[in-house]
Image (cartoon, rainbow, N blue to C red):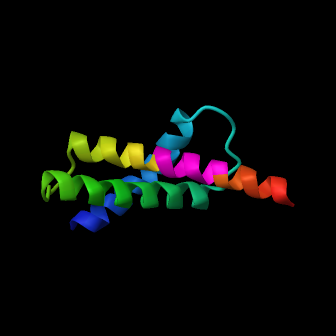
């Protein structure tokens, strides 16, 4: 698989893992969870690859960075969603 395809596939799962790691109730659909995981994985994976050099395959660094990116995107989404809900 190419690097981007691998990030998307791993990211889909990392969205669900991120939801399990982040405390509290997240009212997200499965589709949004997968998208959050993909966005976090691609952003973190791209950053990690630019810092460490191009890495092929599944690595511990890549998996941890995908999870961290997914958590950051999830927390950002939750914060944005709460602030928008208060404006209505």
* Residue at screen point 32% across, 41% down: 64
Q: If the image is split into quadrants, where does the N terminus sit?
A: bottom left
Q: Position of residue 62 (x, y in %)?
A: 26, 47
* Residue at screen point 59% across, 59% down: 32
* Residue at screen point 43% across, 60% down: 38
Q: Position of residue 16 (x, y in %)?
A: 51, 46
Q: Which residues are magenta?
A: 71-79
Q: Position of residue 22 (x, y in %)?
A: 56, 35
Q: Position of residue 58 (x, y in %)?
A: 21, 49
* Residue at screen point 20% across, 56% down: 49
Q: Is the magenta region chiefly helix, strand or loop? A: helix
Q: Is residue 25 left or right of residue 88?
A: left
Is residue 72 shown in magenta?
yes
- Relative vertical location of residue 40 with respect to residue 1 in this rendering, above or below: above
Q: From where the camera sits, is residue 27 visible?
A: yes
Q: If the image is split into quadrants, where does the C terminus sit?
A: bottom right
């Amino acid at each position: 698989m190419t690097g981007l395809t691998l990030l998307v596939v791993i990211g889909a799962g990392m969205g669900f893992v991120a939801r399990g790691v982040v405390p509290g109730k997240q009212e997200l659909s499965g589709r949004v969870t997968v998208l959050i995981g993909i966005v976090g994985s691609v952003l973190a994976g791209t950053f990690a690859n630019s810092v460490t050099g191009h890495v092929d395959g599944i690595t511990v660094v890549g998996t941890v960075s995908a999870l961290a990116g997914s958590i950051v995107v999830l927390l950002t989404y939750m914060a944005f969603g709460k602030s928008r809900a208060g404006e209505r």
